[in-house]
Image (tube, helix red, strand yellow):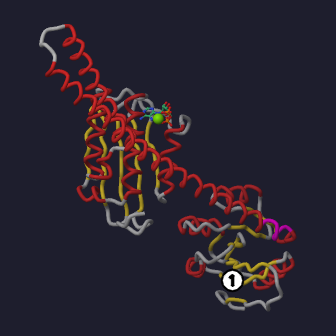
């Protein structure tokens, strides 16, 4: 059978399996198909040999990639590179005649789910099933954690609204009542002194409640957009910590969909908090740029710096999780005494580019 041709199997039951097979030896390909059937699959295999054929057939409807190591003019390492840039969530299994342990390990490091020797193809079925289960589990964990993130954000919104409306409202009524009392009391008596103290206390509490509500979820993030919320955050950080924060954002970013707005806001919040708390930075700079295919965010500080490979806590892991949730890329550049720069790329279009999630 020529490369690229689909081999339709007679229907004899078994689980359907669409396999993309990188194999330049037709006889080995036949053996592989035989083992797939023996393992209880109903395989629909597409055999490819060249880089171009592989790239053209590497499509989301594939269930598994099975790849020989040595191919004419190229090898599985290059195939793994193409596979990784495709970002497809399907297992890549190496099936090779001879392969050294170093090569096998290298392939696993570059994203292969497993490797098998051609004279031990009895393991093929279990290897495919395990690799597919691993991916299904990973998907489930990711979808659970992204649902959790969303639920958490919704909860914050609700608590913020409740605090602002209920507690803030009650405090405002209290202040009105105290003002009424004020006009009925003699101006210099002890009751007046006590009343003024109560009014100050009530005013302070109105401000505290409003601030807690804003910190939980700034209403301006929903009402006015991202940039006013970032500017507010910059002022708030300066007020609390003395660290000066410059915000440089493209105007267009104001109207990003909720998912991006929240993500960027929370990333900036955590980064600034880290810069002020851990790095004792004097200055920080937040940059948000909107490019046709992506949003580029960076948060830079001039603080103590750190080694990001060894000092990840819940904050950084949470940022990585948020970025992964929208399919983006997260990178920290920092060394002790050199400040830190967090760079994030968020691809547009995942949630329909400009539409609400
Ligand atoms: N901008 C920064 N400058 C210096 N150190 C940082 C910075 N950001 C994070 N760190 C270091 O990385 C650690 C992990 O940060 P993070 O994951 O946010 O957890 P947490 O803030 O809860 O400690 C911090 O404890 C700190 O040592
Ligand atoms: Mg932190």
Image vertical order of residue 31 relative to residue 134, above or below: below
Q: Position of residue 5 (x, y in %)?
A: 66, 90
Helix, strand or loop status at disc 1: strand
Q: Position of residue 38 (x, y in %)?
A: 87, 78
Image vertical order of residue 34 relative to residue 327, above or below: below
In this rendering, would 93 be left or right of 50?
Answer: right
Q: Position of residue 50 (x, y in %)?
A: 61, 80
Image vertical order of residue 207 relative to residue 188, above or below: below
* Residue drawn where x is 28% and y is 21% of the image: 201
Quadrant including the N terminus? bottom right
Q: In terms of depth relative to the viewer, which is nearer, 286 or 175? A: 175
Asked if disc 1 is less than 8 Å from ligand 1, the answer is no
| Residue segment shown in magenta | 123-127
Q: In the rendered image, which residue does mark 1 sit on? A: 47
* Residue drawn where x is 54% and y is 38% of the image: 314
* Residue drawn where x is 30% and y is 39% of the image: 233
Q: Residue 24 is drawn in which quadrant?
A: bottom right
In this rendering, would 24 be left or right of 274?
Answer: right
In this rendering, would 150 be left or right of 293?
Answer: right
Magenta part, dominant SS? helix
Q: Position of residue 154 (x, y in %)?
A: 45, 50
Q: In terms of depth relative to the viewer, which is nearer, 74 or 151? A: 151
Q: Residue 340 is drawn in which quadrant?
A: top left
Q: Residue 309 is drawn in which quadrant?
A: top right
Q: In terms of depth relative to the viewer, which is nearer, 240 or 309? A: 240
């Amino acid at each position: 059978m020529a490369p690229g041709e689909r081999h339709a199997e007679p229907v004899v039951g078994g689980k359907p399996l669409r396999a993309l097979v990188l194999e330049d030896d037709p006889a080995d390909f036949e053996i592989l198909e035989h083992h797939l059937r023996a393992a209880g699959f109903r395989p629909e295999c597409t055999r490819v040999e060249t880089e171009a054929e592989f790239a053209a057939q590497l499509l989301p409807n594939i269930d598994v990639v099975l790849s020989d190591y040595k191919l004419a003019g190229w090898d599985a390492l290059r195939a793994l590179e193409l596979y990784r840039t495709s970002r497809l969530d399907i297992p890549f299994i190496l099936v090779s005649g001879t392969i050294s342990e170093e090569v096998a390990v290298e392939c696993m490091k570059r994203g292969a789910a497993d490797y098998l020797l051609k004279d031990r193809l009895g393991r093929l079925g279990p290897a495919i099933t395990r690799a597919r289960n691993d991916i299904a589990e990973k998907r489930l964990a990711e979808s659970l954690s992204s649902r959790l993130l969303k639920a958490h954000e919704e909860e914050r919104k609700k608590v913020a609204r409740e605090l602002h409306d209920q507690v803030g409202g009650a405090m405002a009524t209290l202040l009105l009542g105290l003002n009424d009392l004020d006009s009925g009391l003699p101006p210099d008596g002890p009751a007046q002194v006590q009343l003024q103290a109560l009014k100050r206390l009530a005013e302070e509490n109105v401000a505290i409640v409003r601030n807690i509500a804003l910190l939980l979820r700034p209403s301006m993030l929903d009402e006015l957009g991202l940039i006013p919320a970032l500017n507010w955050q910059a002022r708030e950080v300066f007020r609390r910590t003395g660290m000066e924060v410059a915000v440089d954002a493209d105007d267009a970013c104001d109207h990003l969909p909720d998912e991006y707005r929240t993500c960027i806001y929370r990333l900036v919040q955590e980064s600034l908090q880290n810069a002020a708390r851990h790095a004792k930075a004097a200055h920080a700079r937040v940059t948000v740029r909107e490019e046709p295919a992506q949003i580029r965010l960076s948060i830079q500080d001039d603080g103590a710096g750190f080694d990001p490979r060894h000092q990840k806590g819940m904050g950084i892991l949470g940022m990585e999780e948020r970025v992964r949730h929208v399919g983006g890329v997260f990178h920290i550049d920092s060394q002790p005494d050199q400040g830190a720069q967090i760079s994030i790329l968020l691809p547009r279009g995942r949630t329909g580019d400009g539409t609400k999630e």
